[in-house]
Structure formats: structure tokens, C-alpha cells
Image (spheres, grey):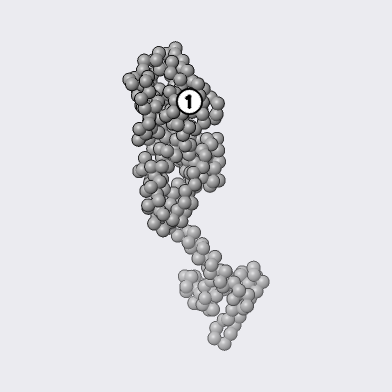
Amino acid sequence: MTLDALLSEHNVTRAAQRLNLSQPSVSVHLAKLRDALGDPLLLPGPRGMRPTARADELREPLRQALDALERAVSPARPFDPAKALQTWRIAATDYGESTIVLPALGGLRSAAPGTRLAVLELVPPRIARQAEQGEIDLAFDTSEGAPPGLRRRALFRERYVLAGRAGHPRLKRRPTPAQFCKLEHVVVSPDGGGFRGVTDEALSRVGLARRVVLSVPHFLFVMSALASTDLVAMLPSRLLRGNPGLQIVEPPVAVPGFEMAMLWHERSHRDPAHRWLREHIASSV
């Protein structure tokens, strides 16, 4: 700051007034700058002091550095989505894509047309590291599975329903527990290859077991499999909204639901753009 004032004023007294310092203090600062830079910087002239060639070289880089510092420490400007050019990166399963990202997408494109959105595959063990290193801005996971240390906002509570193709002969009414267990079930196993889930745990508590004949890693394939076969599945209810090709009934056994949450790192918690994105998503689901 002292060097900038001296190079602008070419006068120690005026520089001191500009900085609200005493003239001797500015003279001491000038002497230290001369020693540090190995150059006199300002030389006596007929009309005050004149800058050296080295001082002229420093003027523009110094101005740019001070401008950058001023921008860095100044209060954050309000975020204007209409002018935004951000690229946001979100980690989600295909369930999160369908129930959270998709409902928010239309409004996002309308309000912030200059932004871009990248949806990455959600890998729960990586969430905390990806958020900390800035590889993702947000993640959508169950509150129960959320890693500690991340900010969290609950979005909604989900419940399971029994689904099969429209006109399924065994889903005309709610099946009994025994009928339910005889049906051929599909399960979604995110880790791959699993044939048990929360439904099987609920059944085992009352001494029952169902027939699971297909295990897949994604929900999208389940929807297609149900529509074209007599297989059934216990699925989150939001995933089935507006799907006329599927029949939905209440299951005969109580299966615990789950809470979906939005997760982010402290590093982006106060950023106006991130705050806008989080509020937009939360209001869309």
C-alpha cells in the first residue's frame, strides 16, 4: 500500500496524507522498500520525486495485485443466477437423479441458463474426500449413510411400496404376507450382487422369507424389468410417480423408509452461488 501511494503521488508528504500516516513513517517504509528491492525507486527531481525505471516496471503489477486483494477481501457480491457461468458437480445415484436432480433441472435451466451441471456417480466412501477437495459441490445420499464432517440438509422422507406391471394378476389387491413371499422379487444392490435388503430384514423378524430372483445395481433397469415381466419389487414411492405402466400396492409387511439428504463441505457453505443452488434444489423436491 505504501509503495502504491508513493508511486502515485511521487511525494512523501502527499503519500503520508493519503495513507493517514506521518511523513517520517512513510520515509522509513520507503527506506525498507529500497533495501528490499535493491533500487532507490524514487529520485529527487526539479518538480518533486521521479520514479526509477524499476519503479515504473512495478506500477502495473502492483496495481493488479492490489485490485485482486481488494476483490478477495471485499464482501461477497450477491449471486445473480441469470449472469452465472458456474459449472456445478453433483454426486447422485440414479434414484437421486430421478427424485432430486430431475425436478430441479427445469427451474435451474430457466433461472441460470449460463451454468452447466455435471452429475457424477455416487460412491459413498468417496463423498467426504471429493467434497473436501472440491471435486463435487453437492451429494445426495441417505441421512443414515452420510459421512460425518459434512454439512447436511434433509430433503424428504421416503417410504417403500410394492410395484409390478400394470394389470399384474397378483397385485389387484394387497397381498397377504404368504402371497407376498411367493412372488418373484427384484432387488437393487448398489454394491452389486446382493440378494437381501431392508425388506428381507423386516420379513426375517416375523419368521418369513421372500423369493429374490434378480439383483441389479440400478433402479432404471428394475422399472423396465417390472414392466415386461411378472417380477415385483419393493421400491421407493417417489421413483414411481407418474408411471402408468406400473401397478403400486401397499406391502403386507412394515419396511422402514429412509431420509434423503443434501450434503456439502464447509468450504462452500457461505458461497453465494452454492447457497443459491442449495436453496433452489431444496425448494424443487
Is residue 56 shown to the viewer in this render?
Answer: yes
Residue lying at the far left of the rendered structure: 173
Task: Report which residue position mark 1 lands on.
Answer: 187
The image shows a total of numbered marks equal to: 1
271 shown above or below 218: below
Above/below status of 255 relative to 53: above
As drawn, the residue found furthest toward the bottom would be: 46
Q: Picture quarter containing residue 155?
A: top left
Q: Position of residue 132 (x, y in %)?
A: 53, 44
Counting from the top left corner in percent of width and height, residue 44 is at 59, 82
- Residue 202: image x %, image y %? 43, 19
**Secondary structure at numbered mark 1:** strand
Looking at the image, which is closer to me, 239 or 43? 239
- Residue closest to the far top: 207
Residue at (51% x, 29% y) in the render: 216
Above or below — where is 148 with respect to 11? Answer: above
Residue at x 53% of width, y 78% of height? 11
Q: Can you give x and y, in whole percent of width and height, for residue 70 in the image?
A: 48, 63
Would residue 152 be visible to someone looking at this image?
no
Quadrant location, the C terminus? top left
Q: Of 28 and 273, which appears nearest the observer? A: 273
- Residue at image position (39%, 27%) is 165
Q: Choose between 275 and 201: the one closer to the eye.
A: 201
Q: Is residue 145 above or below residue 169?
A: below
Choose between 135 and 194: the one closer to the eye. 194
Q: Amino acid at mark 1?
A: Val
| 10 Å crowding of disc 1: few (<14), some (14-19), many (20+) | many
